[in-house]
Amino acid sequence: QVQLVESGGGLVQAGGSLRLSCTASGRTFSNSAMGWFRQAPGKEREFVAVYRWNGRGTYYADPVKGRFTISRDNAKNTGYLQMNSLKPEDTAVYYCAAVADRTYRSGSYYHSDGVYDYWGQGTQVTVSS
């Protein structure tokens, strides 16, 4: 089992930055793809970014490309989402998730929240205008 705990959310003005962290316990991040998703009030949960294992690539949703950066420190079992130039439409609860990374899977496979086995509890990000 893997337990994921997010932190770093908060209230920020438009144009500001936040860095979210996701720390895993119970088992390492080894061989796992780590994804970030978000859910705004009244909307479905949506893909934000994913960092695949062992150099298989990083992928971003179009609305966050160029503003958000996903990274991970496997030695610390921690993933990060650096969010810059935040907009009010980025307001949501942000979740990290993990699933075993398979070489034969395409990057787009990990854009679906349904494939992930482990989820954090979420952290609120609110961007004021």
Image: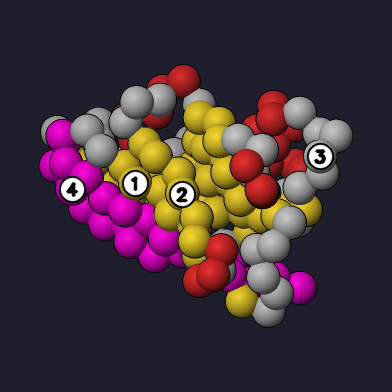
Disc 1 target residue: 82
Which picture quadrant has residue 117?
bottom right
**Residue 115: x and y, percent?**
77, 43
Closer to the N terminus: mark 1 or mark 2?
A: 2
Disc 2 target residue: 71
Amino acid on which the number 2 mark rests in the picture: Ser
In the rendered view, tell whether residue 27 sits above or below residue 60: below
Name the residue: 49% across, 61% down.
73
Amino acid on which the number 3 mark rests in the picture: Thr
Closer to the N terminus: mark 4 or mark 1?
A: 4
Which mark is nearer the camera, 1 or 3? Answer: 3
Q: Nearer the viewer, residue 123 or 108?
A: 108
Amino acid on which the number 1 mark rests in the picture: Gln
In the rendered view, tell whether residue 73 sits above or below residue 125: below
**Residue 113: x and y, percent?**
68, 41
Q: Quadrant of the N terminus?
A: bottom right
Distance Cα–Cα, label 4 vs label 1: 13 Å
Label disc, if present, on residue 12 of the rendered structure: 4
Distance Cα–Cα, label 4 vs label 3: 38 Å
Residue extending furthest bottom? 26
How packed mark 3 is, by other alpha carbons closer than 10 Å (few <14, some 14-19, many 20 or more), is: few
The segment highlighted magenta reads 1-24
Closer to the N terminus: mark 4 or mark 3?
A: 4
Disc 3 target residue: 103
Closer to the N terminus: mark 1 or mark 3?
A: 1
Distance Cα–Cα, label 2 vs label 4: 21 Å
Dots 2 and 3: beta carbons under 8 Å? no
Which element carries disc 2, helix, strand or loop?
Answer: strand
Distance Cα–Cα, label 1 vs label 3: 26 Å
